[in-house]
Amino acid sequence: MIRKEQLDNGLTVLTEAMPDVRSVTVGVWLRRGSRNEPARLNGSSHFIEHLLFKGTTRRSAREIALSMDSVGGQIDAFTSKEYTCFYAKVLDQHLDEAVDLLADIVQHPLFDPAELERERQVVLEEIRMVDDTPDDLIHDLLAADFWPSHSLGRPIQGTAKTVAALTRGQLLRFFRRSYRPENMLVVAAGNVRHGRLARLVRRKFAELEPGGQPADRPAKPRVRCGLVRRPKNDLGQLHLLLGLPAFREKISERYVLHVLNAILGGTMSSRLFQRIREERGLAYSVYSGLNGFRDTGQLTIYVATSPANGAEVIQLTLTELRALSDQGATQAELDVAREHLKGSLMLSLESTSSRMANLARQEIYLGGPLSLSETLRQIDQVTLARVRRLSRQLLRGQRVALAAVGPLRKLRVRREALEL
């Protein structure tokens, strides 16, 4: 059973009971991410995520780690473009310790100057690691060109220049403006009773007073479908990422969009996987994916191939996109895609951490939880006519963005050729 409650200070508490398990995953979610940063503070959300584990007024960094290790639990965090999450997974008997720890790190961080400088070096190494990882780097390159001069186009981890320039004062001010109860959710899934968690949260988060700056709503980004190249001649493969404008996360046809993605490149039986890898042997890794945000979205297609085969892979991909736009999908493809989505969803939600994250994202993007049975019903209601209509709407007449990383000497692609 799913329950939702808003506390007097504006903090939202969400729970989903899974009485047949012994674990519980509890997360503190912030409705702010890298999208909410001004350009000069790019990377602040991610940097702060790191710093909150570096000591509080009650615990050292080592004590934070020991508090979970000593009960066999796990604690971690991540930052995205539109939210940040700190979570702990423990046995149900240790829920109090998990909530106490999470409440401590998001309310009482020290921002110790020495720890801050050490962690700055860690973040800079992470940025260098992305630059050395072409399948990560290419997503940052495409985003920057796809959403020019907009915070959605900036990297979550920031750049070496912006992170090096961030001061303790800037980070503290950003933290105090952001970590307000109106921006926060406490979400738990597993063997948990809602009343017990709500009482814990009231007590442990009592210092969070109403007020402050709620999450702002940055302007909707302007999309540019261009061509961006990053030569890296020391790589053995050419990495390609194609992108098209898609739809925001909260749309009535969101399940149709996920079915369409599964048909295109989301499964091993998908059109792109079968055509590029199985039939032609041109790539090991090929897939499509969806990025949905509050007011926009993106469909991407990633392929890693031999430098000599880049132009052919791009043409094959465009051919499949045109075919899907002009002819739609088949009933057999629809049946496979629907069952794949339902099976993948149900398998993923056997984990308390996945169930917790799913619950939080539904609250952030849909305004409330959607039961598993309702989600499965929505997937079953996706028809061939709806898929065909959406594929025409999404693909017909579109210009496709392209990012390429690797040995580029043999890649000959003109912008005007990237049209459907």
Image (cartoon, helix red, strand yellow):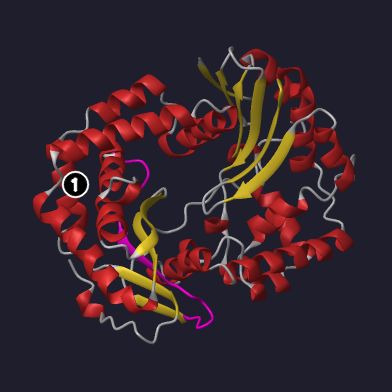
Q: Quadrant of residue 306?
A: bottom left
The residue labelled by disc 1 is 390
Q: Is residue 111 above or below residue 269?
A: below
56 with respect to 159 (left or right) = right
Q: Is residue 273 above or below residue 362?
A: below
Q: Residues within 10 Å of mark 1 (few under 14, many from 20)?
A: some
Is there any visible trace of residue 398 in the rendered image? no
Q: Is residue 52 above or below residue 337?
A: below
245 in the magenta segment: yes
Which amino acid does the dot numbered 1 rest on?
A: Leu
The residue sitting at the bottom extreme is 409
Residue closest to the eye, 25 or 196: 25
Residue closest to the eye, 20 or 37: 20
Q: Quadrant of residue 20?
A: top right
The C terminus appears in which quarter of the rendering? Answer: bottom left
Q: Quadrant of residue 413?
A: bottom left
**Which residue sits at x=49%, y=28%?**
349
Secondary-structure class at tag 1: helix
The residue sitting at the left extreme is 327
Residue 115 picture location, percent across and down: 85, 59
Residue closest to the eye, 6 or 136: 136
**Which residue sits at x=35%, y=27%?**
375
244 in the magenta segment: yes
**Which residue sits at x=19%, y=46%?**
390
Is there any visible trace of residue 113 in the rendered image? yes
Q: The magenta stretch spans which residues? A: 231-252
**Which residue sits at x=70%, y=58%?**
47
Residue 128 picture location, percent across and down: 65, 71
336 with respect to 306 (left or right) = left
Residue 101 picture location, percent across and down: 79, 34
